[in-house]
Image (spheres, helix red, strand yellow):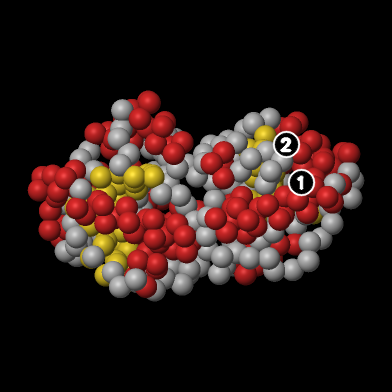
Amino acid sequence: MRITIVVPFVNLTGGIRLLLDYANWLHDKGHLVTVVYPLWPYRYHFDRRDQLFECRRQLGTPAHVAWFDLRCRLLRVPWITSRFLPRADLVLATSWPTAHDVARLEPSRGNKVHVLFHHESGTGPEKRICATYALPFYRISFSSSVRRLLDEQFACEIHDVVPAGVDNAVFFPDGERTEHTVLMLYHDDPRKGAADGIDALTRVRDRLPDIRVQLCGTVRPRSVPAWMPFTFHPADDELRRLYSTATVFLYPSRYEGFGLPPLEAMACGCPVVTTDVGAVSEFAANRCNALVVPPGDVQSMANAVAELLVDSALQAHLSTRGLETARQYALSRTAPLFGEALARALTSPVSALIGAGG
């Protein structure tokens, strides 16, 4: 198949990583895959000055993904229109602004597929986001929870659900666990729950003064306690070692579409404390392979981290079961499912009507 994957940008996010992982797998299986992103950035929370600055910054660099070994073709175009995209059998939209652009493409650019991670509320005008659910697409989601939400709230049909996968060639146990250490990914988006996590860890420190906390992420924090060192944009091998050597990985998110970092931590043998968001309930069960707490419940979060820090038997149990879970969600198992979903999109009557309608 000739497959075009339209992404809004190539910055490091869990969703972009997953799409590029699947793009590589499709490429390695012999499909002609092109990943496309626009030079003129989508608005999201940018104002016009931000967009102009980002466009000029990109003009000074070649099209590339600095943090990922992308093996298929990468194409940076002025904006997403038929004029700049290759002919294809399938063209995938991967976010709400790309869905609007892909919906306007000529039929020769491929039958149209919308890959949905979650309802993208808060990333743009709500009416524009909701309007994508009425566009003519074959839709694929990465979690059953997203399928239920979109069906119940927006009467939006999801045709296929494919779980996200973790690359076990990147994330695997790498180093000895260090006692009394907690790793947390930081992002300033309130939906990621960083403030809850910092609050919970502060409460844990009051009870366990020897706790050591490591934060990392792709957005620098404006202000965090001095005893929480931050690593900016760690490379994959560094992130793998951070996961592998931490006693606990804390995932305090308030809202997710899937929630891939807990699976990455499990793949590295790190015991996990996570909130019950996104697809977490589809792969994590409390006290089976993780400690699971309600989103926003800071005290429960603190209690779970504190318990895990001092209970070596519980650490060993969650580490073992977490590794088993991560193997079930290995990219080598989930990527073929994504390929099968795309094959169904190509031959589906729904997809055929979409292609004919342009």
Q: Residue at x 47, y 64 (%)?
A: 332
Count of numbered badges drawn on the protein = 2
Relative height, residue 148 to residue 167 (above, below): above
Residue contact between numbered discs 1 and 2, judged by CB atoms under 8 Å? no
Q: Secondary structure at mark 1?
A: loop
Kind of residue at badge 2: Met
Q: Report x, y in % for residue 36.
A: 30, 62
Location of residue 288 (image quadrant): top right
Which residue is disc 2 drawn over? 301
Decide if residue 34 is in sight here.
yes
Q: Secondary structure at mark 2?
A: helix
Residue hosting label 1: 225
Q: Residues within 10 Å of mark 1 (few under 14, many from 20)?
A: few
> Between marks 1 and 2, how big is the CA–CA gap?
18 Å
Of badges 1 and 2, the one in the foreground is 2
Which residue does the image show at 66% across and 53% down from the upper left? 322
Residue type at the position of mark 1: Pro
Q: Earlier in the sequence, mark 1 or mark 2?
A: 1
Q: Quadrant of residue 235?
A: bottom right
In the rendered image, the vertical position of residue 285 relative to residue 234, given as above or below: above
Q: Nearer the viewer, residue 338 or 47?
A: 338
Q: Residues within 10 Å of mark 2 (few under 14, many from 20)?
A: many
Percent coordinates x, y for residue 15 in the rendering: 45, 52
